[in-house]
Amino acid sequence: MKKISLRRMAKNQRGTITAVKVAGDLGRRIRDMGLVTGTVITVQGRAPLNDPVALRIRGNTLTLRNNEADFIEVEVEN
């Protein structure tokens, strides 16, 4: 298994969050959205200019900007 930032994940790629590497208000906001260690996510797609990214998480769709996705480390299968 390989660890990458969420921003580098490809469409339809699945992974498990291993770390959220930001503190303060942004870190709290990301965690409040349910993006916490151990959560399984799937990239559903990206906007035409690759920002934002749409994620499937716990049966819901969530979008994140790339600058937010940079702080989330994900373990993906090779």
Image (cartoon, rainbow, N blue to C red):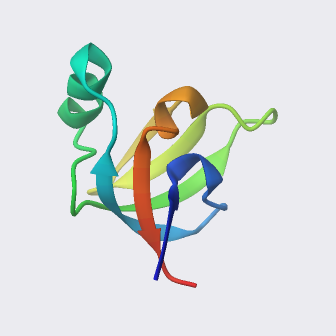
Quadrant of the image occupied by residue 39? bottom left
Residue 2 location (% of width, % of height): 50, 76
State the image quarter where residue 71 is shown: top left
Frontmost residue, 47 versus 7: 7
Q: Which residue of the protein is positioned furthest toward the top in this rendering?
A: 25
Considering only vertical position in the picture, is 3 above or below 24? below
Rendered view: 21 above or below 37: above
Q: Residue at x 42, y 60 (%)?
A: 74
The answer to whether residue 5 is above or below residue 69 is: below
Residue at point 25%, 14% (across, down) = 25
**Image x and y of residue 43, in percent:** 54, 57
Q: Residue at x 53, y 60 (%)?
A: 4
Residue shown at 51% from the left, 51% from the top: 6
Specify the quadrant of the image occupied by residue 22.
top left
Q: Is residue 5 above or below residue 23?
A: below
Estimate the x, y position of residue 66 in percent, counting from the top left: 59, 33
Across the whole image, how many numbered discs are drawn on residues? 0
Q: Is residue 52 left or right of residue 37?
A: right
Is 48 left, or right, of 77 in this rendering? right
Figure quadrant of the C terminus: bottom right
- Horizontal side of 59 relative to 1 (left or right) equals left
Image x and y of residue 15, in percent: 43, 68
